[in-house]
Amino acid sequence: MKVKNAIAWKGAAAALGVLGLVIRRMLYAGAYDPVTDLLDESPLIPALWLVMLAAAVLAGAAFFRARNYQSQADAPSVWALAGNLVLAAGVETMMLTQAAPMPGLLGGAWRVLGWTAPVCLAVTGVFRARGKKPPFLLQLPGCLFFLVHLINQYQTWSAAPQLTAYVPDMLGCMGLMLYSFYIAARNAGTENLGMHLATGLFSVSVCLLCVGETPYPQLYLTGALWALWDLPRPGAPRPAKKEGTNS
């Protein structure tokens, strides 16, 4: 697989994300009623859904194109370091400036993981800058943080009367959680390049779109940059499976 294809995917994912950001910003600027907390009917609503659909199609195309390839071997990467540090800074900013979405155990877990994940991200970035594969457990706090963030938002999202108000944020956070999971799987030796690349590209597009209107702009902006700057690159084709084996 040619590297230029992977670069084109990055550009397409980022372009869709910026387009979605502009559409969402225009939608809330012109069709949002703060009294009722509702969005008025607008042609921008289907346009926003079309952008998310296009992001899913792009991710699916990347999956089918990359599923029979291995990722390139780890090499020193300043971009990977920058991506991990940027996301670490974004999560830390949330911890410093925003209260836990829910009280009790869930809010406490959100806070604990929100302070732990940035440390692990920074250490991961150092490994990547040195061209070494990080221990897969370093990805666990970040993955769990995204999961707990999803759970913490459940009451807010379930109370929202319109899907357009919360589905982009939900999909963006789910994308970051799955992307983190596939990074951990790769580092543990069970790589799935197709899903790794697909979840990363989808996260780039939808997280950038979310920045147009979200309570957590720092999470989605830095999450999009992390996914964009640390996307895997396809390398050699995967070895063909031998007959009589399950591997």
Image (tube, grey):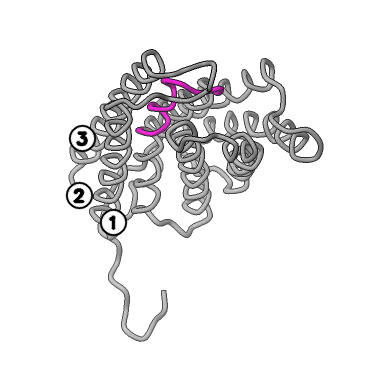
Instruction: Please indicate whether residue 220 sits to the left or right of residue 27 in the image.
Output: right
Q: Nearer the viewer, residue 49 or 219?
A: 49
Nearer to us of marks 1 and 3 is: 3
Q: Please tell me which residue is depicted at 60% across the width and 32% down the height of the picture.
A: 123
Q: Please tell me which residue is depicted at 42% across the width and 34% down the height of the picture.
A: 164
Q: Which residue is mark 2?
A: 1
**At which x and y percent is residue 11?**
24, 30
Name the N-terminal-most of marks 3 and 2: 2
**Contact? badges 2 and 1 (CB < 8 Å):** yes
Name the N-terminal-most of marks 1 and 3: 3
Q: Which residue is mark 3?
A: 8
Measure the C-alpha gap from mark 1 to mark 3: 17 Å
Query: In this rendering, is residue 186 above or below 11?
Result: below
Is residue 206 part of the magenta span, yes or no?
yes
Q: Please tell me which residue is depicted at 31% across the width and 25% down the height of the picture.
A: 42
Name the N-terminal-most of marks 2 and 1: 2
Q: Which residue is mark 1?
A: 69
Residue range of the region highlighted in magenta in the rendering: 205-216
**Contact? badges 1 and 3 (CB < 8 Å):** no
Q: Nearer the viewer, residue 14 or 154?
A: 154
Q: Nearer the viewer, residue 76 or 101?
A: 101
Instruction: Please indicate whether residue 57 sits to the left or right of residue 198 in the image.
Output: left
- Of helix, strand and loop, which one carries label 3? helix
Measure the C-alpha gap from mark 2 to mark 1: 8 Å
- Report the disc number at residue 94: none
Q: Amino acid at mark 2?
A: Met
Query: In this rendering, is residue 60 above or below 131?
Result: below
Within 10 Å of disc 2 (Cα), the crowding (few <14, some 14-19, many 20+) is some
Q: Nearer the viewer, residue 156 or 78?
A: 156
Q: Please tell me which residue is depicted at 23% across the width and 34% down the height of the picture.
A: 7
Within 10 Å of disc 1 (Cα), the crowding (few <14, some 14-19, many 20+) is some
